[in-house]
Image (cartoon, grey):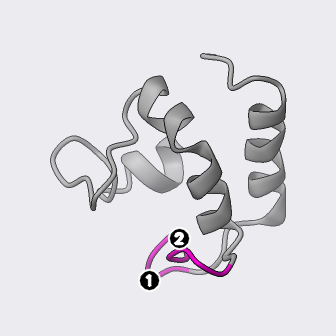
Amino acid sequence: MDQNCNTSGCHNSSNAGGYNFTSHSSVSSNASIILKSIRHESGVQAMPQGAGKLASSSADNFDCWIQQGKANN
């Protein structure tokens, strides 16, 4: 999240692009749409915007985090 979403200048406190992903709470509550976006699934805007699709391992790691209860770590 830090590397590709909030510190990239897209989803931080100054330029949220509709979503601010600088806190665990905001990422956790939007986890399902984030996962769909980084997997480029239909019905959501593909992310990162204007860049190539993230490695499938990044999406898999995020999905694993969701499946394990979205721990604040």
* Residue type for callout 1: Gly
Q: Nearer the viewer, residue 48 or 70?
A: 70
Span highlighted in magenta in the image: 42-51
For the image shown, how many numbered marks are present on the structure?
2
Look at the numbered disc 1 and give the secondary structure of its residue. loop
Name the residue nearer the viewer: 53 or 46: 46
Quadrant occupied by the N terminus: top right
Q: Is residue 6 left or right of residue 15?
A: right
Seen at 66% across and 76% down, the residue is 40
Using residue 13 as the reference point, say whether residue 19 is left or right of it: right
Q: Which residue is the site of mark 2?
A: 47
- Disc 2 marks which amino acid? Met
Asked where in the image residue 53 lies, by quadrant, the reply is bottom right
For the residue carrying disc 2, how many other residues have a C-alpha within 10 Å: few (<14), some (14-19), or many (20+)?
many
Residue 55, x across and y down, in percent: 76, 66
Q: Residue at x 75, y 23 (%)?
A: 69
Image quadrant in which the C terminus is located: top right
Q: Residue 72: x, y in percent?
A: 60, 16
Discs 1/2, front: 2
17 relative position to 66: left or right: left
- The tag on residue 50 is 1
Residue 5 in the image: above or below residue 48: above
Q: Residue furthest left?
A: 14
Residue 15 in the figure: left or right of residue 42: left
Tag 2's secondary structure? loop
What label does residue 11 carry, if any? none
**Point 83% across, 25% down: residue:** 68
